[in-house]
């Protein structure tokens, strides 16, 4: 009897040793908190006539060891980065300028990183007029696979925002070229969608240019999708 028990224990130990080690889980994307999307940040600590220090906040993410905050001045294209293990970080940024920001989640056990959504805001300053925020693409999203309808069309949709609330129109550029050059439609501020003709098994590129009553413009950036 003892011999049988000993043999059973050996088998259990051998089977346990053969179990595969679970692969480390990749980090998850954070939810941004502040500065709020498409807003004016008025809580920065003034560091002088041209700069203020702004605190960025986001929610903690699972399977994450550290966070990389990336803040970009949309006028100059200059990006500031800072890495932290906390869910807050402070950066000195220019007053009266429009910025976009995101947070990358990192895990030391995997090479993969995950980015949050990209939010835009203005840092408060002496500015009295504002350029519209870049249009946010709703559908199709980047690299989406979509089906055309019975009329061989796909609906492009987006949202727009402007602190002055004076958006007048959106220009939609759409083509098979990686830089869309064809202006396929101009719609009023009251509309946020446009139907376009497409062909199967084709990749298309598009972007939205937002215009306001003072002649200011902003671009959504180029998005692509494939029609199946």
Image: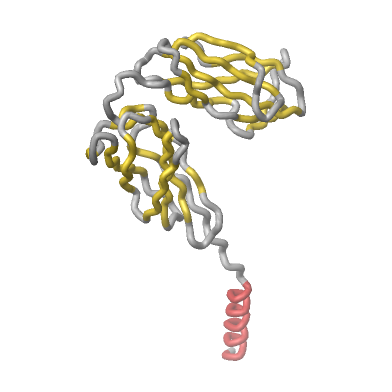
Query: Does residue 172 appear to the left or right of 100 in the view shown?
Result: right
Q: How are the residues colored?
A: secondary structure
Q: Nearer the viewer, residue 184 or 126?
A: 126
Where in the figure is residue 168, as x and y percent of width and height? 45, 10
Question: 108 above or below 69?
Answer: below
> In the picture, residue 14 is in which quadrant?
bottom right
Q: Residue furthest front?
A: 49
Q: Nearer the viewer, residue 111 or 127?
A: 127
In percent of the image, x 75 and y 21: which residue is there? 199
Where in the figure is residue 217, as x and y percent of width and height? 47, 19
Q: Nearer the viewer, residue 20 or 148?
A: 148
State the quadrant of the N terminus.
bottom right
Query: Does residue 25 appear to the left or right of 124 in the view shown?
Result: right
What number of labels is visible?
0
Where in the figure is residue 19, as x and y percent of width and height? 61, 70
Question: 208 above or below 19?
Answer: above
State the quadrant of the C terminus.
top right
Question: 52 above or below 39?
Answer: below
In percent of the image, x 44 and y 42: which residue is there? 79
> In the picture, residue 204 is in which quadrant?
top right
Where in the figure is residue 170, as x and y percent of width and height? 52, 15
In percent of the image, x 38 and y 27: which residue is there? 38
């Amino acid at each position: 009897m003892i011999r049988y028990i000993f043999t059973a224990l050996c088998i259990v130990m051998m089977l346990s040793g053969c179990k595969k080690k679970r692969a480390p889980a990749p980090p998850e994307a954070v939810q941004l908190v502040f500065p709020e999307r498409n807003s004016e940040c008025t809580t920065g600590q003034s560091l002088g006539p041209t700069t203020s220090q702004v605190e960025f906040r986001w929610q903690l993410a699972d399977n994450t060891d550290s966070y990389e905050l990336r803040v970009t001045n949309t006028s100059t294209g200059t990006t500031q980065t800072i890495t932290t293990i906390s869910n807050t970080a402070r950066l000195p940024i220019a007053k009266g300028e429009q910025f976009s920001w995101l947070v990358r989640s990192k895990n030391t056990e995997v090479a993969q990183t995950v980015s949050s959504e990209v939010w835009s805001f203005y840092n408060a300053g002496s500015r009295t007029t504002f350029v519209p925020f870049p249009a946010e693409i709703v559908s199709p999203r980047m690299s989406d696979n979509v089906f055309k309808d019975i009329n061989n069309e796909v609906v492009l949709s987006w949202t727009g925002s402007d602190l002055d609330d004076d958006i007048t129109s959106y220009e939609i550029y759409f083509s098979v070229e990686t830089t869309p050059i064809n202006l396929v439609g101009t719609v009023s501020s009251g509309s946020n969608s446009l139907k376009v003709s497409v062909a199967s098994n084709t990749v298309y590129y598009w972007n939205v240019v937002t215009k306001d009553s003072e002649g200011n413009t902003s671009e959504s950036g180029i998005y692509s999708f494939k029609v199946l």
